[in-house]
Image (cartoon, grey):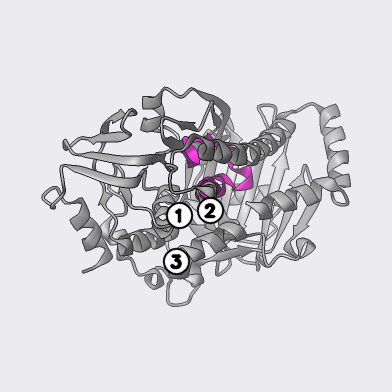
Amino acid sequence: MTIAQSIAQTMAPGADHAASLVVDVTVVGAGLVGLAAALACHEAGYSVALLDSGPGLTQSQLNADANSLWNASGQGATSTNWDARIYAISPNNAKWLAELGAWPLLDKARLGQINAMQIFADGVPLSLDAEDESADCLAYVLESRALAQALHERVSMTGMPVLFNLACVAFDSATTTLHLADKRTIQSSLVIAADGSQSWLRQQLGITVQKKSYAQLGIVANFSVAQDHAQVARQWFTSQRQDGGTILAWLPLSNNTVSIVWSVPLAYADELLALSPTAFTKAVMQAGGEALGEMQLISPPVAFPLSRQTCERTVQDDVVLVGDAAHQIHPMAGQGVNLGFRDVIDLLASWQTKNSYQSLADNSLLKAYTRRRKADVLSMQLLTDGLFQLFASANPVLNGIRNAAWQLANQGLIKKTLLTLALKL
């Protein structure tokens, strides 16, 4: 039986399910963080159910042969082959995903690696190198689809109940019971809400969310490049526009391919998205100082709104919010999914001190988890929000002070802080 068939059988309406399922942990949301959470809880010895109102990966995605995505000359993929969603996974999280058995399932031929970063603030450079911290690399760069497929494969091997295309209609906090659209229920000691920035569970709990729009779009696209990117990530902060600054990042993928994330004001985003592929490519090359020579667009640009989102609390009524359900940050640091993985890692760490009489939702355990996560998430939110505000200003006096400080950063504490933040997640 294929992976897709086994998952489909678990999801099938006619499958043999009890009217009420009782498990230790229910994970709601089968994105990257939800899949990893379900797998990690299972590996820790807990019974788990995974639930998502969407379809999960389609059978064609699950059965995709990664090798077929490359042409015979090995020069790159066609426009439909590269996933627009690219993530930079920290070394610590890559190690954790390897422990879960997902990382070895990735196609290494499509895995990029960041050994160094070059950051330019209005032309002023700052260099970060993994060797400065005696690290093997700063991050690994991969497609969301590839990691999702690997996690799906591992989840399917566990035999845990996986219910897709099935929405929750009610949550009984008194009994920690989820009521599903098909009249079934799932009761558990703890629910992990990994159901995204518009989290249904968070809304049911009435948890207040502070949302700040950056009035920008993030434009993502993939390119083949003429010159060797040398496993260096490049990022340009500019403050030359009156309607706000821009942030352009080039992330190194395999086979001289790069993925870009370009954060730009709304009006400028409209201009860029209206360009022809040739003109858009030229704009990207110019914004990056043609650092890698000629570029060829290999996947069409896709845009998404940028915002910061903070919840008043991430634990309530035996429910723990993780990933985008708990927090959102500006994508400039590429750390959103890393923070979500750290949520899960720290939650499991809080259970290591649990005695046999304590529930997984024991108040003291979840308080320890909340304290552990608060500082980590806050530091990343302050860093990304602070940098955004700094470069959103068109004030020449402020810009001069900022650029002078940026020049000093190459020898100072800022450089070490940025390296530490990149590596600790």
Q: Count neighbours of disc 3 (C-alpha within 10 A) and say few if under 14, some if 14 to 19, many if 20 or more.
A: some
Contact check, label 3 and label 2, Cβ < 8 Å? no
How far across and how far down the image is residue 123, in percent? 79, 46
Residue closer to the observer: 204 or 74: 204
The image's mark for residue 144 is 1
Residue 62 spot, x, y in % from top left: 31, 62
**118 in relation to 317, above or below:** below
Q: Which residues are magenta?
A: 321-348
Q: Is residue 324 magenta?
A: yes
Give x and y (percent) for residue 420.
73, 52
Q: Mark 3 is on which residue type?
A: Gly
Magenta stretch mostly in which secondary structure? helix
Disc 3 vs disc 1: Cβ atoms closer than 8 Å? no
Quarter placement of the N terminus: bottom left
Camera-side residue of 106 and 277: 106
Q: Position of residue 87 (x, y in %)?
A: 53, 53
Q: Which mark is residue 87?
A: 2
**Label 1 is placed on what type of residue?**
Ser
Q: Residue at horizontal 31%, vertical 49%?
A: 49
